[in-house]
Amino acid sequence: MTPQPDALELEDLVMHFGPVRAVDGVSLTIPRGRVTALVGESGSGKSTVGRCVVRLVEPTAGVVRIAGTDVTHLSRRQLRPHRSAVSIVFQDPAASLDPRMLVGEVVAEPLRLSGRRIPRRDREARVATELERVGLRAEVARRYPHELSGGQRQRVSIARALISEPRLLIADEPTSALDVSVQASVLNLLADLQRDIGFACLFITHDLSAVEYLADDIAVMYLGQLVEKGSRERIFARPAHPYTQALLSAAPVADPVRQRQRQPVLLGDDLPSALDPPSGCRFRTRCPLAFDRCASEVPAQVGIGDGMAACHLVQPDGSGPDVRAAQTSEVLS
Amino acid sequence: MTTAERAGAVAAVATPVLAVRDLSVSFPTETGTVSAVDGVSLDLASGEIVGMVGESGCGKSVTAMSIAGLLPGSARISGSVRLDGTELVGTRESALRRVRGKEIAYIFQEPMTSLNPVLTVGRQIGEVLQIHERMSRRAARARAVELLTLVGIPSAAKRVDNYPHQLSGGMRQRVMIAMAVACGPKVLVADEPTTALDVTVQAGILQVLRDLRDRLGTSILIITHDLGVIADIADRVVVMYAGRVVERAPVTDLFAHPYHRYTAGLLSASPTPGRHAGTERLQEIPGLVPVLSVQPDACTFADRCPAADARCRESAPPLEVARTGGTLAATGHLAACWHPCPQPRTQPEEANR
C-alpha cells in the first residue's frame, strides 16, 4: 500500500439489478482532498455508484477501494471499522432523517455506531460543535427534524455525515430539493467545510452549474458508463464528448440576451433502456454525429490531458467533434 | 428571439386575453388562516409568454390554480379574473367546466400523475375533443394523431395507442401539452412544466411551447423557480414573494437591472456557468419565505433584506415604477420596493440590446 492512498478508487465497477445494468464498468479515482462531480441525467446510474461506494449495495463486480482498503465484498461486520471513513448526504433530508429522533440523536448516531465508548457529555459537546460548524445553533439538538426548514434539515444531514470525520463524503444531489436561495447557502457551506476540513468529495448531480462552483474534476456518466472525465476548467471550456457538449448547451443560462443567442443541441428524449443498452457506443441512438462504426464498435477511452473521452471522433490531442457546430450547419444546409 | 421581441412589443398595446386584478386567496386551516396570495394583478396579451418566478411558498401555483377555479372549495378568493372579458371568479362550476380545457388549459409538473395510467394517450386526448368539440370517437382519434405530431412526437400514429408508462418523461409531457392545446385554448397555464425533466429534455419541451405560441398564437403563463427557463422563454416576467407581486418587467430589463432586492438576490443566488468559476461565493438570501396569516401593511421581504429600514416595516410599498432616477419608465418595469437597487449608469437602450 502506498503511504498516501487515494480517497476513493473505483476499478471497473459493475452493479446489475437483475437484468438492469445500472452501472456497467466505471473506473474513477478521487485523490485526497479533491472534489469530483459525477454528472448525468436521471437513469444514468450516478446514484447507484454512490450507493456502491458507501456499500448500501454490494457491487456485482469490480473493486471499491476507500483510502486504500478494498471494501467491495466486506461483510457488514467487517465493514464497520471502515464506516467512519466515508459518509453520505442524500437529496431529500425529509426522507433521510428519522422523524422520531431528536436532531441531537440523529447527529450523534454515527458516533454511537462506531463502537467506541464515548461519555455522554463528550458526545453532546461533539454534537454541539458539529451543529455550529454547519451554521446551526446548538439548541437545535433538542428539536425534531419536522420543526426545521428544508435547508436546516440538510445542514443536519451534513452535520451527521461529518461527525465521524470521514475522509470521503458522498453528496448525492444534496441541493436538488431546495429552493434557489437555500441551495446557494448549502453549496457555500459544503465548499467552506471542504476547504477547512479537507475531505474528498464525490458530488453527484444533474446540475452542471452547481458543479462549476464546487468541483475540481468532473466525470460525465451516460447509461451506466463514464463518457468523459477531466478537470472542471477543461470540461467547461473544451468539452470533448458529444454528450457533454449537449448537456452543457442544454442547460439554460439565467441571462436572456445570452440564452437566446445559444442554440441548444436537441437530443430527442428517449434515454434507451438500461435493460438492453445499444450496441457499440451507448450514446449513438441520440448522438447527432453517430456513424456506422458507433453501432459496431465500443469506443475506447481516449486520453486527453489528465482525463479521457470515450468517443470514436475524439483525437488524442483533444480535438474532435462539435455537435453544436454540426447542428448549426445542418440547419443552414 | 425576434418573435419574442415582436410579441413583447405587441403585448404593450393589445388588450389582454387574461386580466387578473387584485386577486387574493386565503385558506382556513386548523391553526388559523393562511394568506397565500395578496392583491395580485397581471395581464397576459395574445401570443405573449409571461413567466412567473419565485421560491416555493410564494403563491405562484395558487395564483395559477385560482385562475380557472381549480382550488378546493375551502379557499377564499377575492378579486377578478377576466378571460377575454368574461369574469371567472365566482362563476358557477358548470360554467367553468365549459371554459376549462377549451378556453384555458393547464399542464403540470409531473405528467405521470396527471395522465390516466389505464387509458391510451389517444383516448385521453380524444376525450377532451369528444366533450368540448362533440367530435366522434374516430374523428377525435385522428385529431389526436395530428396533435401528437404537432408537439413533436415521432411516429405519432403508433404512439397514439401507447399507454403512459410506455413513454419517457419528456414524451409524457408532450402528450400533456397535446391534450392541453387540443381545443385551441386562448391561454395555456404551464405550472413548472420542465422541473421533473432532465435538461436535455427540457430544452425540447420549451421549444414546443414556443412553437405553439408562434403557430397558434396561444398565450402562455409559465410558472417556474428556474431563472434559466425564464431567461429562455418569457417575454415578460412577474416575480412573486410571499403572495405578492414584487416586480414586473420585460425579461431583458429584469435580468439586466433588477429593482427589487428579492429579485436581485434570486439572480445572484443562482449558479450561472461562467460567472462563479474560481473561488467566488454564491450570494445567499438569509432567512425563509414567511407563512402569513394576515398580510401586514409592510414589506414582507424586510426581514431578509439588506436595505430594509423602519419605513419598510411600517408601510407596504406599492407596485410602481421604481424611483431610481433612471429613464426606464416607458418599458413597463415596476417594483414594490422602497429602496430599489441602485442602477448602473448604462443607457436603457444599451441594456435592452
Image (cartoon, rainbow, N blue to C red):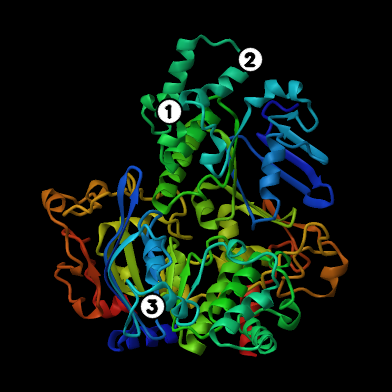
Quadrant (top left, top right, bottom left, bottom right) of the C terminus of chain A:
bottom right
Residue sitting nearer the eye, B226 or A129 = B226
Asked if residue B84 is positioned above or below residue B254 in the image, the reply reads: below
Indicate the position of residue B1 as horizontal and vertical percent values: 44, 82
Indicate the position of residue A112 as horizontal and vertical percent values: 58, 18
Residue B160 appearing in the image? yes
Residue with the mark numbered 1: A131
Indicate the position of residue A315 as horizontal and vertical percent values: 74, 65
Indicate the position of residue A131 as horizontal and vertical percent values: 43, 28
Residue with the mark numbered 3: B235
Residue with the mark numbered 2: A115
**Secondary element at tag 3:** loop
Q: Which of marks 1 and 2 is nearer the N terminus?
A: 2
Callout 2 touching callout 3 (CB < 8 Å): no
Q: In this view, does B251 lie to the left or right of B347?
A: right
* Badge 1 and badge 2 in a common chain: yes
Q: How crowded is mark 3: few (under 14 residues within 10 Å), some or many (20 or more)?
A: many
Q: Residue at x 78, y 33 (%)?
A: A72
Q: Residues within 10 Å of mark 1 (few under 14, many from 20)?
A: many
Q: Is residue B21 left or right of residue A241?
A: left
Q: What chain is tagged by disc 1?
A: A
* Badge 2 and badge 3 in a common chain: no
Q: What chain is tagged by disc 3?
A: B
Q: What chain is tagged by disc 2?
A: A
Q: From mark 2 to mark 3, how far is it between C-alphas? A: 60 Å
Q: From mark 1 to mark 3, how far is it between C-alphas? A: 44 Å
